[in-house]
Every structure is written in C-alpha cells, then in structure tokens.
Image: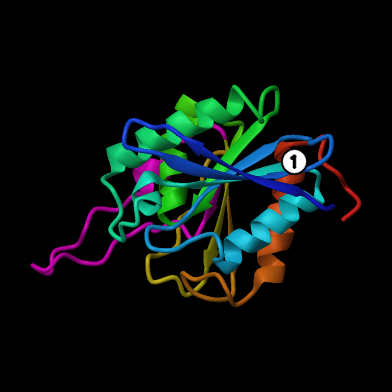
Amino acid sequence: MRAMTTTLELDTPHGPATAHLHAADAPAGALVLGHGAGGGFGAPDLVAATTVALSLGIFVAHVEQPYRVAGRRSAAPAHQLDAAWIAVVQQLLGGPLRGLALVTGGRSSGARVACRTAAATGAAGVLCLAFPLQPPARKSGAASPSRLGELDAVAVAMLVVQGEGDQFGMPPPGPGREVVRVRGNHSLRSDTPALSAAVAQWLRRVLPASRVDV
C-alpha cells in the first residue's frame, strides 16, 4: 500500500516538534512512533515497523522530539520528552488521526516515552523496539536501576522486540506483555524479517480491522 507523506510542525511545552505523517487509504488505526535518543527514523527497526504497519492499512506518524528539531544531540530529560510527546499525540488525535484506534511506540528511548505516557495518550497498545532495560553501570561501578517498572506500569497490550545480544538486557514477558527475541543486538538490524513478522502478527491482534493479505 502506497502512503501519502506530509510533515507537520506542532507546538509543545518544550518547543516545536515535527510529525512526519504516512497516511494510508481508509486506515484501520494509527501507529505513532518515537526515535531513539541519538538516532532518527532511518533506523532499520523503525523502517521495518513502518513498512509493516502501512502494508496493513495503518496510518503511521513519526514524532521528532523538540531537542532534535532544535539540532541538539543530547536527549532532553524524561519529563520534557513525555510532555512533548503527549502534546503531539493529543494534537494528532484531534486532527489527522481523529477517530482512529491508537498504538504508540518507538525505538529505545522512544519506547520508554511511549510506555510512560500510554495512559495519558489513551493508547490501545504499546510497541517497544530494543527497550533499554538495564542502563550501563555508573562510574562508581554500582549497578544502575532497572527500567522494568516502566514496562510493568503499562496496562494495555504490549509487544517488545529485543535482540538476543542486546547490551541493555532482555525484558521478561509479563501480563499483557509479549517479548519476542530476534537475532542481533540493540541495533535490531540483523533479522528484520523476524522483527517484521512479529510486529505484523501483534498489530493484527491489537488493531483487528487491519488488512490480513500481507
């Protein structure tokens, strides 16, 4: 399915964000994705998830956080990322995504944002690509706290696709949380066919009106 692509600049409490919209004809739902802390939407896992969603007739939006729009390399603090994300999603739901069932998600840092804001955005599901479960040890050598609580706090359906060799660890499955292990590391570039298959199967369950002919 070929998608029409447009770009919107949207105001947030922390500066303008950009939403790149990939619109499908008669969409079955919407998937809003966030990028990693230092990367963009050319990441192989985000490209694969986007391609799958569009093939299922799902409207896809890529949200570029204000710090990246402003040209900064260092990610903003979590509370700023969350506030900007919520503002963007609310505007999208009031405009081009009006009336569509919503799935949010993203890669690494973007996955964390989607988890923390799932309730606030009204998401029906959360897609996590390369969730950074265990950050590196601190300079003192002490272990950093696990981020499992961010996953456990999500009360809707969730898919985590994680590389078997991910240096940030492997999240466990949980109630409503499916974890699919694929070949590779945190980049999720080694087995995009397996990633695509997992995302397609999960999206069909969360957004049951999506196409089934792919």
| Residue 41 relative to residue 70: left or right | right
Residue farthest to the left, as pictured: 140
Q: Is residue 141 magenta?
A: yes
Q: Nearer the viewer, residue 154 or 59?
A: 59
| Residue 179 relative to residue 6: left or right | left
Q: Is residue 143 magenta?
A: yes
Q: Residues within 10 Å of mark 1 (few under 14, many from 20)?
A: few
| Magenta-tinted stretch | 127-156
Residue 211 position, x and y percent, is 86, 44
Residue name at image x 12 percent, y 69 percent: 141
**What residue is shown with label 1?**
205
Residue farthest to the right, as pictured: 213
In this picture, is 95 found above or below 161? Answer: above
Q: Is residue 158 visible?
A: no
Residue name at image x 37 percent, y 65 percent: 168
Amino acid found under the numbered disc labelled 1: Arg
Q: Nearer the viewer, residue 167 or 104?
A: 104
